[in-house]
Image: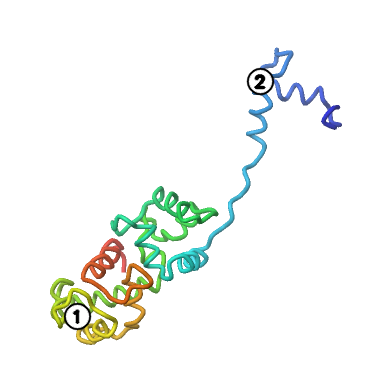
């Protein structure tokens, strides 16, 4: 009566009792039933496309966000628990568990950069395929095709010349931006290509 309940209070009392012979209720009896009947609020849905937009807003490029926040240890793959923790650390709210399932389309149990961004998947595979066909390895291609002036760093123009040397006909500027770790960087190093190759190798399916 004090809370304004107008239903059958005797029936409610019997329903809330844990044992038939009980003549009283405790706070725990109400709490147990409340937990069973009150649904937790549903988390907002995040589509893969929404997720890519979030990553670009934070880091400029999906690949930069992947290396800086999602795969900081450079393993090349991120498992579900790691994904949940790291996306929340980035301030991303919503149903990240369902998002992981949507990204892991071939049910590997982990995701790679190629799962997160299909464009990255295609362009990086094409780039490293050209390296393999012309020089075999990144270590062989770097001094011969890219670092022709023996510098440890390669600018955008030199990188474009290296891409031409290996026969890569894709978007060179896009690849250059993808491989950079920081948005304001103006050069690439051999380590950048190695790190990008890790994600390609981790994604076994073509």
CA neighbours of label 1 inside 10 A, class few (<14), some (14 to 19), many (20+): many
Q: Position of residue 12 (x, y in %)?
A: 77, 26
Q: Is residue 187 above or below residue 65?
A: below
Seen from the viewer's position, the closer of residues 124 and 162 is 162
Residue identified by numbered label 1? 146
Q: Position of residue 97 (x, y in %)?
A: 48, 51
Identify the image quadrant of the C terminus.
bottom left
Assign a secondary structure to mark 1.
Answer: helix
The disc at residue 3 is: none
Q: Quadrant of residue 33?
A: top right
Q: Position of residue 117 (x, y in %)?
A: 41, 68
CA neighbours of label 2 inside 10 A, class few (<14), some (14 to 19), many (20+): some
Residue identified by numbered label 2? 18
Seen from the viewer's position, the closer of residues 98 and 88 is 88
Q: Residue at x 23, y 71 (%)?
A: 189
Q: How many marks?
A: 2
Q: Quadrant of residue 25?
A: top right
Q: Residue at x 66, y 38 (%)?
A: 38
Q: In 3D space, how far apart are the residues under numbered discs 1 and 2 (Cα atoms)?
A: 75 Å
């Amino acid at each position: 009566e004090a809370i304004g309940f107008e239903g059958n209070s005797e029936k409610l009392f019997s329903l809330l009792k844990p044992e038939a012979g009980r003549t009283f209720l405790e706070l725990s009896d109400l709490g147990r039933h409340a937990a069973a009947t009150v649904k937790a609020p549903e988390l907002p849905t995040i589509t893969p496309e929404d997720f890519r937009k979030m990553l670009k807003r934070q880091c400029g490029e999906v690949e930069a966000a992947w290396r800086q926040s999602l795969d900081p240890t450079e393993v090349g793959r991120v498992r579900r628990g790691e994904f949940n923790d790291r996306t929340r650390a980035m301030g991303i709210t919503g149903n990240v568990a369902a998002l992981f399932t949507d990204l892991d389309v071939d049910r590997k149990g982990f995701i790679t950069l190629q799962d997160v961004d299909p464009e990255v998947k295609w362009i990086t595979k094409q780039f490293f395929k050209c390296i393999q066909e012309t020089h075999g390895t990144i270590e062989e291609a770097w001094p011969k095709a890219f670092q022709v002036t023996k510098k440890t760093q390669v600018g955008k123009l030199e990188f474009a010349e290296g891409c031409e040397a290996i026969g890569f006909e894709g978007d060179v500027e896009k690849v250059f931006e993808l491989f950079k770790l920081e948005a304001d960087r103006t050069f690439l190093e051999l380590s950048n290509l190695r790190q990008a190759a890790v994600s390609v190798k981790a994604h076994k399916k073509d």
